[in-house]
Amino acid sequence: MSEHKAVRTRRVSLGGAGKNRRIDIGGGAPVSLQTMWKEGIVPVLTDQAALTAVLARIDSLAQLGCGVVRFAVPDMPSADALNKIAGGSSLPVVADIHFDYRLALRCLEGDVAKIRINPGNIGSAERVRAVAERCREKGVPIRIGVNTGSLPADVAVRVQGGDLDRAEALVETALREAAALDALNFQEIIVSIKASGGEETVRAARLFSSRSDIPLHIGVTEAGPLIGGIVRSTWAICTLLNEGIGDTVRVSLSSSPENEVIAGRAMLQEAGKRTGGVTLVSCPRCGREGFDVHGFMERWERRLYGLKADITVAVMGCPVNGPGEAKHADIGITGGGGTAVIFRHGAVVKRVPAAEADQAFAEALDALIV
Ligand code: SF4
């Protein structure tokens, strides 16, 4: 356990009108999952099919367990595009803004649910005030995002001089940014403090949570590619969650938003912060001739995780060991010798030719969760 004691956080509600669901962060609300959109969004301004595709993908992210989706807003067309998306999104939409406060004001003309800025890089106090006042009018909170690449010059000098280590510098910067908003009587704040190293991220989050009741968004920034990034993020995020630190989570990966959400939901499950939903178990396969576990998982993983059902699904490589090893599964599939086998709680309920495996599994699944 940490020597630092986490302060119970205040509760902040993400706003947003239209179809957007409201979501609470902090104050004992369930820990939510976030992801970030990875493509430009300007085409939605002129292409209805592009808008429809973005909204459909947001729907599928919601089904996977995502609670909030963030978009980069680098210019005014992106701000206009985000307002179009926010008006139809089934998830709260966050605008991620650097440097130009006018982009935040433009986004606040629409249904964005949160603005992510660094007050320190937005410019003069008047500009920060303009954003905070508009956020207050709209009931939209602000996330202050601090990372080691954006420390204020005076703090960076103290780090170089040895007065502060980088975790302390991140916390000092976040508290300073929060104080700037507090001075404007704006307290609807969420803070993220991210370092690219897991240990530094954990130390900074512990220190911040011992000094502030502001809800904390946790994650490791630039965590890496899919596998290495998940390993690094899992250690840091689960360590913090197990200490009661962290109100909302994003797993930053050089991979798709869907993989970020799937990784995040597994972390929440491992940390005991999420129960229910589909649990997938599958064997690694071995040299025995059997069922194509890897191919089946590639085709079915997202679909299964998107189901609203509290079930365990097993995908096993051979009928000799598979059903027995996965006796606890509510439904499973395996096979060998050109045959696929559907089983429930270890007992075979159907055999079909391997080419009909997906259809037979889909029918058995439908029968189970109707
Ligand atoms: S279930 Fe069968 S195929 Fe899978 S690892 Fe075990 S023995 Fe190998």
Image: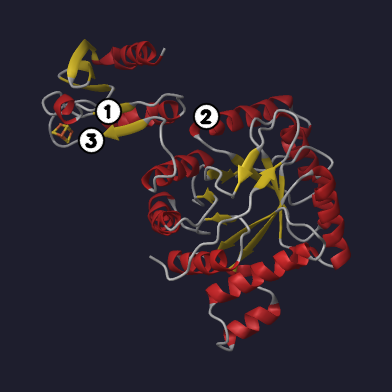
Label 1 crowd bin: few (<14), some (14–19), many (20+), radius 10 Å: many
Would residue 350 appear left or right of 265 to someone viewing this image? left
Quadrant placement of the N terminus: bottom left
Determine if the C-beta at disc 3 is less than 8 A from ligand 1. yes
Determine the secondary structure under disc 2.
helix
Q: Which residue is mark 3?
A: 283
Name the mark on residue 63.
2
Can residue 338 be seen? Answer: no
> Which tag is nearer the camera, tag 2 or tag 3?
2
* 69 in relation to 101, above or below: above
Q: Residue at x 52, y 45 (%)?
A: 31
- Kind of residue at badge 1: Ala
Q: Residue at x 69, y 79 (%)?
A: 153
Quadrant placement of the C terminus: top left
Q: Earlier in the sequence, mark 2 or mark 1?
A: 2
Q: Position of residue 170 (x, y in %)?
A: 59, 71
**Disc 1 and disc 3: Cα gap in Å?**
8 Å
Would residue 305 appear left or right of 144 to someone viewing this image? left
Q: Are marks 2 and 1 in contact (CB under 8 Å)?
A: no
Outermost bottom residue? 161
Name the mark on residue 314.
1
Q: Position of residue 331 (x, y in %)?
A: 28, 21
Q: Residue at x 71, y 42 (%)?
A: 113
The answer to which of 286 and 23 lies nearer the viewer is 23
Determine the secondary structure under disc 3.
loop
Determine the secondary structure under disc 1.
strand
Q: Earlier in the sequence, mark 1 or mark 3?
A: 3
**Disc 2 and disc 3: Cα gap in Å?**
25 Å
